[in-house]
Amino acid sequence: MAQTLLLAQDGGVLTITFNRPEVLNALNDQVIKELGEALRRAECDAAIRCLVLTGGGRAFSAGQDLSSFAMREQNPDRVSIREHLRDGYNRIVTRMRGLEKPIVAGINGVAAGVGLSLALAADIRVAAENASFTTGFSKIGLVPDGGMSFMLPLLVGIGRAAELAFTSDRIDAAEAHRLGLVNRVVPAEELGAATAALAGQLATMPTRALGLTKRAFNRTILADLDAWLDYEAHLQEIAGRTDDHKEGVRAFIEKRQATFTGK
Ligand code: LHQ
């Protein structure tokens, strides 16, 4: 099976690149598995002192692979959305926040759905000026998951978070920067060098102190991370049973506008 992630270590920096460019780095079970393994490697290897998460091709990540998700829905033995989240994305987010090393997201293109959630779970976000952002969930009748329901209001404030989550409007990097969603915006051709320079700097800092700082921030603002993730999964289970969710996914696959009924 083709590798869905590319890993490259340069000094103390491990760069993880989503590698499904043909579907805008949409995330399937294999990506989640490989990402879990890469994070485990970063936890165990003292030589790795900073992570970079980025995307290959024109996207950072378009979120859950909706084609594989729609096929999964036809399997009578499928696990519930709640379990899908608990066993997959929630573990990844817990690992990312629990990793006591800095994580820099190099957002090279569109970040949507849980792809955006993973960018928000990183510590610092650097975006290319042609990157774009959409929560995306409401377009398929779902609620923000992968930690987005608390990271988004934390970063941009609850009013702006509501607007972004309700409308799923796509915003550009300049707007994302204005809202506080990303730390820096750089010309597209400089993104690799800019993230590498920042990550290289962080990798030479006192890793233990940075890790403990992250632990302190987590405790201050994400003290109930696991409970929140669990609650999101519970809400997603409810949303996932609606007609609007089924219509939203069908409409995406059939490349047409969804008609939502509110049910
Ligand atoms: C895709 C995808 C995609 C497959 C583009 N899947 N193929 C958690 C738990 C349980 C249930 C479900 O979900 C979740 C978490 C989530 O992440 S839910 C949200 C999932 N993501 C989305 O709803 C975003 C869907 N994608 C889009 O809205 C657009 O593609 C964006 C805004 C990302 C980019 O738009 P464009 O730049 O116009 O590109 P495109 O739409 O033309 O996409 C290019 C290709 O990528 C296209 O395939 P094709 O064969 O026509 O070239 C898309 O079908 C494919 N693709 N996203 N998520």
Image (tube, rainbow, N blue to C red):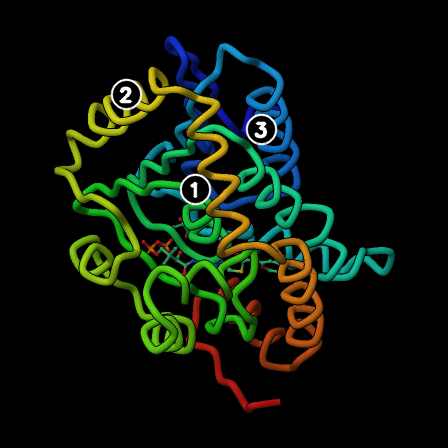
Q: What secondary structure is found at the residue carrying circle 2?
A: helix
How many circles with numbers are drawn on the protein? 3
Tell me the number on the disc at residue 122: 1
> In this rendering, would 67 be left or right of 234?
left
Residue 129 location (% of width, % of height) = 16, 45
Q: CA distance from mark 2 to mark 3?
A: 20 Å
Q: Which mark is residue 205?
A: none
Q: Earlier in the sequence, mark 2 or mark 3?
A: 3
Q: Secondary structure at mark 3?
A: helix
At label 3, the amino acid type is: Leu
- Amino acid type, mark 1: Ala
Relative depth, front residue between 20 and 221 = 221
Name the element at disc 1: loop
Q: Quadrant of residue 160?
A: bottom left
Q: Which residue is mark 3?
A: 39
Q: Which residue is mark 2?
A: 201
